[in-house]
Image (cartoon, coloured by chain):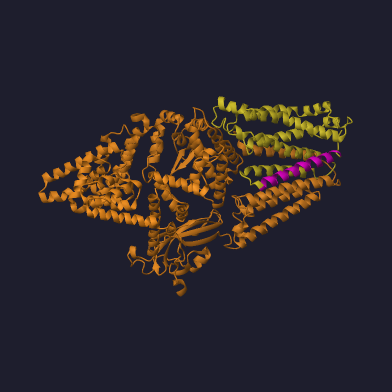
Chain colours: A yellow, B orange
Amino acid sequence: MKVKMSLLGMLFRQGLPVTLIGLPIGCLYVLFTREPLAWQNPWTALFVLVHSISVAVCLGRFRSRSFGFIYTRGYLRDELWAHKMLATVLAVAAVWLPMALIVWLPVRSVVQDKLLVSPYFPIMRIREASAPWAWLAGYAILLPLFHYVWIRRAQPLRGGNGVVLLAIGVVIATATLMSFRWHPQWFRILLWILSAVVVGTTLIAGRSLHRQLEVHG
Amino acid sequence: MIIGFFGSLLVLGLVLGLVCFALGRKASLPKSAPRGNRTSRIAETLILSSAGLLIFVMIGCLSRDGRLLNLGELRPAYAATHIIIACCAVGGLLLSVLLSLLGRTSAGGVLAFVVLSGYSITIQGSHFGPGYLMQRIAPRDSYEPIVTYTFELDDEVQGADLWVNDVYLGKTPIKMTGREFHKKVPFLSRPPEGYADEPPHERQWFIILLRVLKAETRGDGSLWYTDDQKDYYARARLADEWNRFTYAHCHNRGNSRLRYDFLVRLPSRFDSREKVREQRKQRLENLLQKARLADYQVQPSWFEAAETYGQDGWTKLRTLAAEEKGFGQVVDKWVEWKYGVTRDISRDKAAEVFEKICKEVNAGRRYDEADPAGRAVELIFDRLDVRRLVSVYEQAIRSRRYRQLQWELRNVYRHLMELWDAKLDDHKDGKGNIIEDRITPALICWGSDMEAAVKFGGAQVERYLLRQYRHEKRLSGLELDWNDLKSHFDLHLNKWLFHLSQLDSDAGRDFRTSHRGQVLQLADLLLNSSFNHDVDAPEFLFLDVNQGAGSIAYEFWPKYAAAVRSSDIWEYRKLEKQWAYLARLEPPATEDMYMDCWRQVTDLHKLMGSDKLAGAIEAIPKEMRVAVAKAIIAELEKKIEAKRKKLDPERAERARFDEHPYAEALKRHLACIGDEESLQWLISALQSGADKNYHTDQVSRLLASEKGRDHPLLRVLAEAKSAKVRLLVMPALVKYPTPANREILHKLSKDEDEQVRQAAEEVAAELARIEETPVEQLVFQVKVATSDVGQNR
């Protein structure tokens, strides 16, 4: 399958407002927050959650006219799904990458050290380096799930609200997980396996159900 | 941050709810529409199962009261209750999964939520729910922690018969559960019959301060368990001999709230065992005498014998090595014998030895820097690749294995890092070293081990502490954030101030100078803490004593002196502590300051004897000591003279003995440290036999003690004119046959006096006997002495 730049551009533009709002919020927070960033940081987790929901909502408004318009331009359903996923990746990268670079380069460390005279920097720079990967993992779990939610709701099938409840359940499970400070090694392995199952399932099932999507013209 | 994180979650939840509501309204599918196809059912089932499994594992295994991974620690009935509840939860989850598989994801999701919430509330309780449900569901008392008692003698031998509250428990070591113990042994609110009749030193009974389980009731009626202490009256008999001591303590070896493993170690005070211990001590002394006689050139068999004394043998050797150079060689040879470590060890061999030590530490779960392994590490550390060591240690800290890394192994690495840090600090040119650059930040980032980070020091930790202090400058108090709090003694101190005050670096000195007021306040708090029983001055006061009269220690002196004087420690300790403080202030500490301390002593009897005064004065540096001692002697003699003038001769002679022994003790001390005038006085006193051989006894005691090993007085007395005085050195020559003392003995064996010659020959014969004793005979063997009383009872 070839990447159609015009389609990708159009889909990316749909999520542009979210990107434009999320980018400065995320970057400013990462730059100026005093406490060292860690994967359990509740504010960045909340940011990832809201950003993921927003991206999924922007790309999955299946009752909107623009949605119907794109789906009646002769693109294959799989093509559309793949481009939506690609647009999602770009929307996430547009926010996540600058935030990660601020941490890694280390703009944050310099600002905190020189400008804000934070005690934690530059010492904590080495520890914070892993935080962006945790955010990315959060996006990787949540976005396929939220895309699955709207794809499932766009089916001519009952039980669409159940999948919303399911998504809320997954978010609660993640929040509960974050409240535990220390996880043994076996649990971390279990966590990776279950996360992979959820991500894999939502992607495969999402792609499959996307083919039977009911579009309201 | 105005609404807080949970407020934000609430808002988000409301928004989500509204979105769902709006979406739900728009969804207007006919009721005849199917409930999802195969793909959606499978997908939703998988998602629900994954999330449900994750939460279930977190509640059942990782939460505070989740016991599924340590069911073995619970009583069987309680473990069964946990299993049944977990099975119910799993059943509910399976049902929800089934519902999801049938296309009823909403119902499945709600059911899973209810089941998991119920599971969590049941095993953990909740503030708003019906309290701790587990105690209502589980059989009565099944949730009581399991208690085990072990009674044993703190000796190599066991097998003593033990009675507690007059109930025979068996032969030590005795192990029994708490329930068994309490069923068998009644609690006595008053001492048993006959206890009060016997005088304490003849009493067969002793008190065990036993820790027992105590149940407390929470506000919701549920129980929680803690431990309390109760007195139990016990007797122990070994081979027809009663143990004689007063108290035995009990401590918990377990580290779980579910199991208490109480150990009661009974001090072994049987006369027969005391004799064995005395023999053991004598054999060890003989072993050391053999080493001295061999000019510290000992054979492997000597090490084999010394090793049978366990930790005592090694500790004794390390202590001696600090004062007797020859034993320093013996220590290193022991390490060579045990680990093959020589001073010119190759890098590969050093790495091999290090690996061996790590394995030993892993297996034995013990590492002490003062052990042979610790000495081996000291000898090989600079042959090991510091970069590799730093990488391993840093990786361990970064990978969160730091807390899991075995405590003892962590100590090995910590010791290595300290040795390397000290070595690198010696050669540094104003820059940090690899340990300060890599280990210190890692310890702050991942290990949260501030103590270790401060110990290694370096620019990074200094900057970190200074900046933290800039954010929180309050001295102490519970209102400090936990991150800024350092609990020390009974105090809640500003962590940053505490650590900054102790930095032994330029940054530390600058800090103490610029924040002098707060540092002094901190010192005052630490000094006057009710937990500082010995009124020890904080060490950081002495880090800048080179500033002389401008140092904080000098400024703090009046406060310290006042605190010591008002404390309830022994009077001679007060004197000793004040003098020791002044000694550390040298040179600005003047003779007058030392004498001021002395003048505070209003009643000489409170000094607990003249020996204590002579001991206390040793805290003063030698040159100053002579001046101070002479000034005290002059004051004492002035008092004696004043009494003589004031009282009639008979009463004056009696009253003279108030001050006289103190003056003489100081003179003897001065003679011992080489003061010529006092030495002449002592020798003439010894020769004249004045004061009914009092001086002879004192000197003999001194020479027979550890101090007699290489005392300067030894040579002076050996060369004294009087044969009687020369004879005084003989016990020290037997006890400490060092090369120098053997030389003295050799001279005395040719003494002109017959009695001295004979005594010297006897000493030589005794030494020859020790030299000829095979090392194998000096091995310490445990002979198990048991009693048959238990069987005959």
Q: State whether residue A48 is above or below residue B95.
A: above
Note whether B62 is above or below B580 in the view shown: below
Q: Quadrant of residue B435?
A: top right
Residue A173 point in image, percent of width and height: 68, 44
Residue at the limit of the structure toward the right, as seen here: A74
List the single residue furthest toward the top.
A115
What is the quadrant of the C terminus of chain B in the image?
Answer: bottom left
**Is A147 included in the stretch rendered in magenta?**
no
Query: Does residue B528 appear anywhere in the picture?
Result: yes
Quick check: B421 above or below B134?
Answer: above
Q: Which residues are magenta?
A: A186-211
- Provide residue B703's location: percent of width, then percent of height: 29, 50
What is the chief secondary structure element of the magenta stretch? helix
Residue nearest the observer in this picture, A181 or B460: B460
The quarter of the displayed image where residue A39 is located: top right
Please check the rendered image and state whether residue A187 is part of the magenta-colored stretch, yes or no.
Answer: yes
* Residue found at x 50% / y 61%: B149
Q: Is residue B240 left or right of residue A153?
A: left
Q: Quadrant of the N terminus of chain B?
A: top right
Q: Is residue B531 visible?
A: no
> Is A165 situated above or below B177?
above
Q: Position of residue B348 (x, y in %)?
A: 58, 41
Q: Nearer the viewer, residue B298 or B325?
A: B298
Give percent across and percent down for residue B368.
49, 47
Q: Which residue is drawn at the image coordinates 71% and 26% (left, top)?
A: A20
Q: Residue furthest bottom?
A: B792
Number of numbered callouts drawn: 0
